[in-house]
Structure formats: structure tokens, C-alpha cells
């Protein structure tokens, strides 16, 4: 229960003039989703996902400089494309059979340029870090995810922050918040065995840009 709700409940218990119905209404209004977030200890979804600067296993011996335009052959190797208005983001070289790069198009996919360092590469064990989906948020903001990794840039690929979920059993899609902040909907990967999350559960995470952190703001465990 949030602090304001607890204060209201104490007042009511002491014979305050605050009606219990009003206390309940305030508690409901303070809920931010279909079900108010449970405590970190009781939820299978972490309260915060702290990202770290850089891309942990971004192999640099085949580095392509940022803003490099792709040639015609490379254009054909762009996939996992997602649109944000007139801008498209995608991945060069999926699936993870070669070094993956984040790429962007400003002309509906007719031409592409590299917008960051390698996301991951096909080295022993490296497929864990390979992107399997692109989430285009805006012309300058993009998220790349797999079932265990979140890579995000909010400045057209100049800086990247990564969160790694070692359990390797998440399914992640975009969630649109009404205030325009970056969001993710996280649920159990349907292919994962022995997941700690109920089959139909999910959690909503909001990205706190200044802190480079994802914050759980709502969840449903049913």
C-alpha cells in the first residue's frame, strides 16, 4: 500500500471524519495499472532493471563506424525492422550469424546507415546478446531486445545502455505510456521452461532516462 493510502487508513481507524470509501477511492486512484505493483520481494518481476553503459559483448574487431551508409548488398541484410513515423530502425545481419549492428533509415527503408556499435556477434555463447526484435520509439530513440537483453539508445545511437536478464525467459514488447515516456511490457517467454512467472502474467516498465533504469510501474500476476 502506498504511504498516502496508509496514512488515510490510520486516520479512518482513529475515528477521523475521512470516510472509509474515500480512503479506498484514493488507494485505487494511486494505482498505476491493471494491478498495483507488488513489493519487489513478492513479485517475479524485479522492481528496477538497472542498465549499464555500453554493450557488454559488442565485438569491435569488425567495427563499422557510426553513420556509415550501407551498400546495396548490406541493405538486403537488414531485417527486424520497426517504424516510428517516417523513420525506420532495424538490425544488420540477423539472425545472429554475423556481427549485428543497429541501423536506421530516414526514407522508408530505401537506404540505411549504421547508428551505433555492434549489438552482438556470433561467438561462442554470444547468441544470448543478439537482438531478436526492434522497438522503434522515435527518430532518435530505439530499443533492441531478445528474451534476455534490453539495449536502448535515446540519442540516435551515440550512447547505449544495456540490461541483461540472465534467466533468459522473457518476452518483451513495446508499451505506450500516455505521457510519451519509453515503456516495455514484459511477460514470460512461451518457449521458456521452468519460468518463475505465471503463464499469463506481465509487468509494465517505464524507462527513466536520466538514471538509465527501467522501473516497474504495474503488473498483473493472474
Image (cartoon, grey):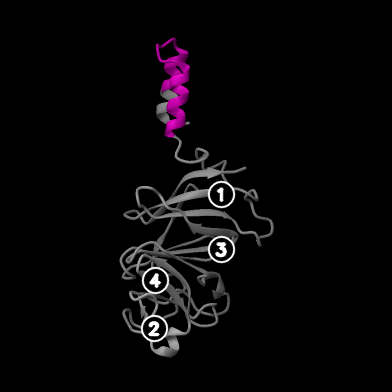
Q: Earlier in the sequence, mark 2 or mark 3?
A: 2
Q: In the rendered structure, are the residues bearing label 4 and label 1 in contact, judged by CB atoms less than 8 Å apart? A: no
Circle 2 sits on which residue?
63
Residue neighbourhood size for the residue with mark 2, other residues' Cα within 10 Å, grouped as few (<14), some (14–19), many (≥20):
few
Secondary structure at numbered mark 3: loop
Q: Quadrant of the C terminus?
A: top right
Task: Give the Cα separation between the discs numbered 4 and 1.
Answer: 27 Å
Q: Earlier in the sequence, mark 3 or mark 1?
A: 3
Considering only vertical position in the picture, is 167 above or below 18?
below
Q: Kindly identify the residue that appears in the image at 35 percent across and 48 percent down.
A: 179
Nearest the viewer among 173 and 14 is 173
Secondary structure at numbered mark 4: strand
- Viewer-nearest of discs 4 and 1: 4
User: Is 13 in the magenta?
Assistant: yes
User: Is 45 in the magenta?
Assistant: no
Residue neighbourhood size for the residue with mark 4, other residues' Cα within 10 Å, grouped as few (<14), some (14–19), many (≥20):
many
Task: Give the Cα separation between the discs numbered 2 and 3.
Answer: 25 Å
Span highlighted in magenta in the image: 8-30
Percent x, y of residue 166: 56, 61
Circle 4 sits on which residue?
88
Amino acid at each position: 500500500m502506498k504511504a498516502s493510502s496508509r496514512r488515510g487508513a490510520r486516520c479512518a481507524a482513529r475515528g477521523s471524519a475521512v470516510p472509509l470509501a474515500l480512503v479506498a477511492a484514493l488507494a485505487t486512484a494511486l494505482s498505476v495499472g491493471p494491478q498495483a505493483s507488488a513489493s519487489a520481494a513478492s513479485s517475479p518481476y524485479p522492481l528496477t532493471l538497472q542498465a549499464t553503459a555500453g554493450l557488454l559483448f559488442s565485438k569491435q574487431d569488425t567495427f563499422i563506424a557510426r553513420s556509415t551508409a550501407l551498400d546495396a548488398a548490406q541493405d538486403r541484410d537488414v531485417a527486424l525492422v520497426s517504424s516510428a513515423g517516417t523513420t525506420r530502425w532495424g538490425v544488420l545481419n540477423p539472425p545472429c550469424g554475423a556481427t549485428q549492428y543497429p541501423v536506421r533509415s530516414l526514407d522508408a527503408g530505401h537506404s540505411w546507415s549504421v547508428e551505433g556499435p555492434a549489438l552482438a556477434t556470433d561467438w561462442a555463447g554470444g547468441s544470448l546478446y543478439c537482438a531478436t526484435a526492434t522497438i522503434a520509439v522515435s527518430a532518435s530513440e530505439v530499443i533492441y531486445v531478445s528474451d534476455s537483453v534490453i539495449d536502448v539508445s535515446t540519442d540516435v545511437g551515440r550512447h547505449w545502455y544495456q540490461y541483461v536478464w540472465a534467466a533468459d525467459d522473457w518476452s518483451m514488447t513495446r508499451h505506450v505510456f500516455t505521457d510519451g515516456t519509453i515503456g516495455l511490457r514484459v511477460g514470460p517467454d512461451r518457449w521458456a521452461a521452468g519460468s518463475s512467472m505465471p503463464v499469463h502474467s506481465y509487468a509494465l516498465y517505464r524507462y527513466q532516462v536520466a538514471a538509465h533504469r527501467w522501473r516497474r510501474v504495474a503488473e498483473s500476476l493472474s
